[in-house]
Amino acid sequence: MISRAVNDGLQEIVDALSTRLERPVLVDDVELRPLAFSSQTGELDAVRTSSILSRHAPDAARDVLFGYGIRAASVPVRIPAHPEISMSARVCLPIVTSGQPVGFLWLLEDPPVREDELALAVTAAADAAAALVPDDDALRRRERELLERLLGDDPALAREAAGALEDDSYIPLRPLVVCVAGPPGDPWAEALDRVRARAPVRHVLTSELGGCAVCVLGAHTALRGELPAALGAAVLVGEGDEVPALREAPRSYRQALTALRVAAGAPSRVARWAELRADRLLAALPDDALEEVPEGVRTLLSGGHEQLVETLATYLEHAGDAKATAAALNVHRTSLYYRLHRIEELAGVDLSSGEDRLMCHMALRLARLS
C-alpha cells in the first residue's frame, strides 16, 4: 500500500491514461507490487490477474521481466509474450526520478501500442514519478520525523510510524536491519546522500539521530555491504539483528548501538550483533564500569605500557598457555615470563588465579569499548 494522497494522485494518472488509450494501465513499485490500476477491460493474462489479486507478480514473471533489464532502463522496454508462463506481450515504461527507478507503468500489447500512444504513456510515467516522490527536502524531513518516532522510546509512536512507513512501501525487501554509524568523516548530510544514491527510492530509510547516521535497509541488499564505503572510510558501523518487520526495528536499533561500541576493535570497523559474544554483556555495563577495576589494573591500561598490555591480552586469549603465547608474540618464553611478572607487579594481580585472570580480561575488553 501507499499513502492516500499518493494513491489518489497515481490513480488519477492511471485512469486518465487508460481513458485516452482505451486500454488497461497498471503502475507497480520497483518490486512489481501494484500501486494503482485502471478498470480492467478486455482479456487479461494470468500474470496481470495474479499481480492484482495477490498484490505482487508471480516469481516466474519477476524473473522474466527483470531479465529484460527494466530496473536499469530509462526508456520504454517492449517485452514479448511468454506463453510458458501465460504472459502476454507488454510495454514497460520505467518511472524514474533523479536517476533512480521508483516504479513501472505497464501497457498490454493487445492491440500493439502505437508510437503516439507510447508518447502519452511516457508523459504519464513522468507525472507518476512526481506523484510517487515529493521534493527532496520534504522527503528528508518526513523520513527523519518517522525514523525518530520509529526508534524512539514511545512504543505507541513507534507502532504508528511503522504503519505509516509500511503504507508508503518503505523497505520492501525483508528481513531488514538497522545500522548505526559514527563518528562522521564527512558531514552526515553528504554521507547520507551517498547512501541514498546507491538504492532505489524508499529502499533505505536514513537520517542523523543523536550524532550518528542511522540506516534501515533490507538485510540481503547489496547496499548493506556498501554502507561503510558510502558513509566514509573513517566511520565505525554497528549492525543490529535482522528483523522481519519495521515494527521490530527498535530492537535492531538498540543492538546496533551496542555493536557500534565494539566496532572500534574490529579489523573491518564493522561489528554485527549476531557475531558479538561476551561483548554483548560488557557493552551493556555502565560507561563508568572501568572505574570499578582495581587501581593497579587501571594504571596498566592507562598508557605507556603498550607492550605489557599486548602481552597480557595475548596470554589471556590463549587461556594462559605460555608456549602458545610466546609463539604468538614471537618471543622466548623467558622473556614472556619476565613480562608476566612485571604485569603482576604493576597491576597487583596474580595471573595464576582464575578470578584475577577473569578480572583482567574484562578490564581489557572494557577499555577497548570505552
Image (spheres, rainbow, N blue to C red):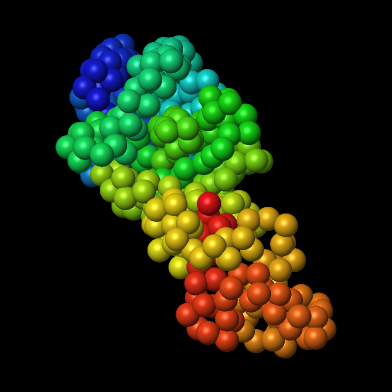
Q: Position of residue 122 (x, y in %)?
A: 45, 16
Q: Residue at 24%, 18% (x, y): give it.
A: 5
Q: Residue at 72%, 57% (x, y): give it.
A: 304
Q: Image quadrant of residue 51?
A: top left
Tally the numbered discs.
0
Q: Is residue 237 visible?
A: yes
Q: Position of residue 349 (x, y in %)?
A: 57, 76
Q: Residue at 31%, 45% (x, y): give it.
A: 250
Q: Position of residue 87 (x, y in %)?
A: 37, 43
Q: Is residue 331 left or right of residue 230?
A: right
The answer to whether 101 is drawn above or below residue 233 in the figure is above
Q: Is residue 51 visible?
A: no
Q: Residue at 39%, 57% (x, y): give it.
A: 284
The answer to whether 110 is drawn above or below residue 309 in the figure is above
> For this rendering, which residue is in front, 366 or 215?
366
In the rendered image, which quarter contains the N terminus? top left
> For this rendering, which residue is in front, 61 or 300?
300
Q: Is residue 328 left or right of residue 138?
A: right
> For this rendering, which residue is in front, 133 or 262?
262
- Residue that lies at the very extreme toward the left in this rendered image: 156
Q: Is residue 32 left or right of residue 24?
A: right
The answer to whether 311 is drawn above or below residue 365 in the figure is below
Q: Image quadrant of residue 153?
A: top left
> For this rendering, which residue is in front, 289 or 118?
289
Q: Position of residue 296 (x, y in %)?
A: 58, 66
Q: Is residue 316 left or right of residue 94?
A: right
Q: Image quadrant of residue 135?
A: top left
